[in-house]
Amino acid sequence: MDKSKRPVVIAGNWKMNKTPSEAKALIEELKPLVAGKTGCETVICVPYVDIAVAVEATKGTNIKVGAENVHFAESGAYTGEISAKMLTECGVEYVIIGHSERRQYFGETDTTVNQRVKAALMAGLKVILCIGEVKEQRLSGITDEVVSMQTKLDLEGIDAEQMKNVIIAYEPVWAIGTGLTATPEQADETCGVIRRTLSAMYGEALAQATVIQYGGSMNAGNAAELLAKLNVDGGLIGGASLKAHDFSVIVDAAQ
Ligand code: 13P
């Protein structure tokens, strides 16, 4: 399959930004800028408290709403956590799982990431699974091993049918929020390593059909170059997704 047959997915990850009223204002600004841009799937992943506002404000538009995390249990004594069913009932379609900030600051491991992926898929959510190496790993020349291992561990027990609802976001940790972007060649190469890992796990047809995004300081100025690469099927965008104009330029670049 050639790249043009894969969907392109541009997703914003707002992280811990925007109150509900700010969220509404940003979405209202974004809506006309991305209206009719059907060449990619446009997703905004927002804080839990912004979900209701985001779902309401995006009704009838081409913008889909995602969450930034989900718990692995169906329900129970997990103070402060949110289940997959709670998200689907609120109208959420996508969920980011395994973001490096969750791994770094909140003790998430490949095991808990895998549990979350399973719970999200069971509930009918589409998963954006984040993987990527830290700076020391890239400098040691073990990036390929790291992303391949994360892919295998995080998708353990996920079958080919479920993989239709999985997007992988390759996010080199050293490029997140640093202004340091992977070069288009680095992004393409490592997304290619992930695709080869998927091929070994599920076969080449599934690997070629899977959307693999790049994330890490993607912005209005560098998106076109990154998205042009053979193995890069979209972007997961942090900082630039908080500015309607910048995010819409990235959506334009994906058309
Ligand atoms: P920045 O685009 O701010 O580097 O963040 C990337 C990211 O972490 C998206 O999930």
Image (cartoon, rainbow, N blue to C red):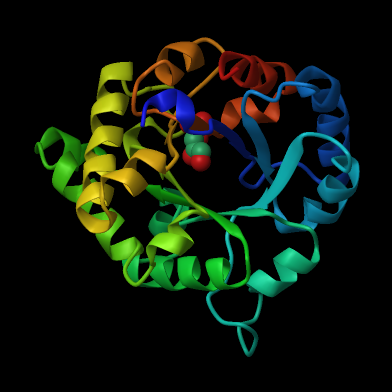
Q: Is residue 189 above or below residue 124?
A: above
Q: Quadrant of residue 186?
A: top left
Tell me the residue at 53%/30% (across/down). Answer: 8
Residue 206 visible in the displayed image:
yes
Q: Quadrant of the N terminus?
A: top left
In the image: residue 135, left or right of residue 113: left
Tell me the residue at 18%/40% (across/down). Answer: 143
In the image: residue 24, left or right of residue 251: right
**Residue 221, image x, y percentages:** 52, 10
Q: Is residue 96 above or below residue 83?
A: above
**Residue 141, image x, y percentages:** 10, 36
**Residue 177, image x, y percentages:** 47, 32
Q: Quadrant of the C terminus?
A: top right
Residue 200 or residue 93, whichever sits in front: 200
Q: Quadrant of residue 98?
A: bottom left
Q: Is residue 94 above or below residue 160?
A: above
In the image: residue 198, left or right of residue 28: left
Q: Is residue 113 above or below residue 29?
A: below
In the image: residue 119, left or right of residue 233: right
**Residue 26, image x, y percentages:** 81, 31
Identity of the residue furthest to the bottom in this view: 77
Tell me the residue at 68%/54% (across/down). Answer: 93
Q: How many marks?
A: 0
Residue 133 visible in the displayed image:
no
